[in-house]
Image (cartoon, grey):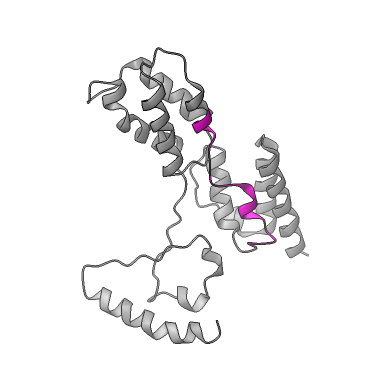
Amino acid sequence: MEVVVPAFLPKLQMLCDYVSTRQMGVFFVTNYYETIDRAILRGGRINHHILVLPYSRESKKQLLKKSLLKHWGNGHKLPISAEKKLDQIVAESDSLQCYREVEQIKDAIRSHWKKPSDKRPPQVDKAMYLTSIIPEIYNPKKRNGAFHELHAILDRRMGKLTPEDDRLQTADGASDYLTSFIAQEKDAQWKSIAEKWKAELGKKDH
């Protein structure tokens, strides 16, 4: 990397200069933002960092609703009974589902649930708990610089939008946040990851 980064920087700068004179946008996508060299992230090379999170509850409902307008509705509107079923699905399903998992819920409904008045089939129940985002992804031993992303993920698990929180800039504030999450979280694996981060942040503070 000592050779690759210096060689890459002039090319990145040329790309940025080219794009800045045209109505263009260039996106670099990574699951490990915290590992990117700081020189690459400098303003004028990469100007914005956009954290793409799993769907919020309302976004998930709207996506499912749009996908099921013809299956359960008249193509324009869902009946109240279908709206209530979607509310239940969103409330009970895993809070960290991405597009692929929401599509699987939709496909299960279309294939196995003809009318919302029918009993919810097991295929839909199974799809509701699928997720590709597992706690171990955020193990601080592997991703020591990923706390900002973890905070957003934990907020999503608690059904909250992620506000700018000045408290998280300090180890004490971050520790208080994790303590609050641990008290509310029911999943043992997510509790464990939060506890590991709390311990890791405690080391940095001493």
Q: Of 54 and 162, which appears nearest the observer?
A: 54
**Residue for point 65% across, 47% down:** 177
Q: In the rendered view of the protein, which quadrant contains the C terminus?
A: bottom right
* 179 to the left or right of 57: right
| Residue 176 located left or right of residue 31 | right
x and y, in percent, of residue 15 in the image: 32, 78
Q: At 65% across and 59% down in the image, what residue appears?
A: 170
- Residue at 65% in and 63% down: 144
- In this picture, is 54 found above or below 147? above
Q: Position of residue 105 (x, y in %)?
A: 43, 32
Q: Position of residue 12 (x, y in %)?
A: 38, 79
Specify start and end residues of the magenta stretch as a single range: 126-143
The question of residue 140 being in magenta is answered with yes
What secondary structure is the magenta-colored segment mainly?
loop
Horizontal and vertical percent position of residue 87: 44, 24
Residue 187, quarter of picture: top right
Give the residue displayed 46% in from the left and 40% down from the top. Answer: 101
Question: Extreme front residue here?
Answer: 111
Membership of 125 in magenta stretch: no
Q: Quadrant of the N terminus?
A: bottom right
3 over 161 or under it: above or below: below
Q: Classify residue 172 by image quadrant.
A: bottom right
In front of the other: 109 or 172: 109
Q: Is residue 111 left or right of residue 132?
A: left
Q: How many marks?
A: 0
Looking at the image, the residue that sits furthest to the top is 117
